Image (cartoon, rainbow, N blue to C red):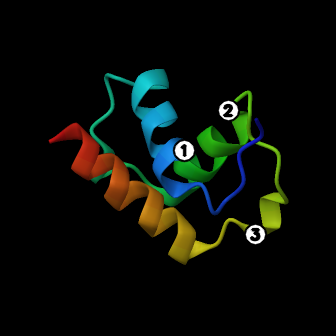
Amino acid sequence: MSLKWSDVQEIALQLADTHPQIDPRYLNFVDLHRWVLALPEFDDDPERGGEKVLEAIQATWIEEAD
């Protein structure tokens, strides 16, 4: 299975597993973008990871962390 930017929920879950010590409320988009690209299953155009999708990933990760 490969992850795309549209897989917001799965990306957030994998980031939470990969970075359990991070509070996503304080994460900047530069790091978030880099971490998404570093996920082993991620396979999408890095340029498509704009502010809106990063906000959605961050919001989902915050929900999962609570």
Please provide percent x and percent y for residue 57: 46, 57
Mark 2, other Cα within 10 Å: few <14 / some 14–19 / many ≥20: some
Please, what is the three-letter code of the amino acid marked with disc 1?
A: Ile
Which residue in the structure is indicated by mark 2? Answer: 39
Quadrant for the C terminus, please: top left
Label 3 to label 1: alpha-carbon separation: 14 Å
- Comes first in the chain, label 3 or label 2: 2
On-image quarter of the N terminus: top right
SS of the residue at dot 2? loop
Label 1–label 2 contact, CB within 8 A? yes
Left or right, residue 4 beside residue 60: right
Residue that carries the numbered disc 1 in the rendered image: 11
Q: Position of residue 9 (x, y in %)?
A: 46, 51
In primary-sequence order, the first of circles 3 and 1 is 1
Question: Which residue in the protein does label 3 denote?
Answer: 48
Q: Marks 1/2: CA distance?
A: 8 Å
Question: Can you tell which of label 3 and label 1 is closer to the viewer?
Answer: 1
Question: Callout 3: helix, strand or loop?
Answer: helix
Q: Front-most of 33 and 13?
A: 13
**Residue appearing at x 62%, y 52% in the figure:** 33
At x 72%, y 43%, the residue is 37
Q: In the rendered image of this protein, does residue 37 appear above or below residue 59? A: above
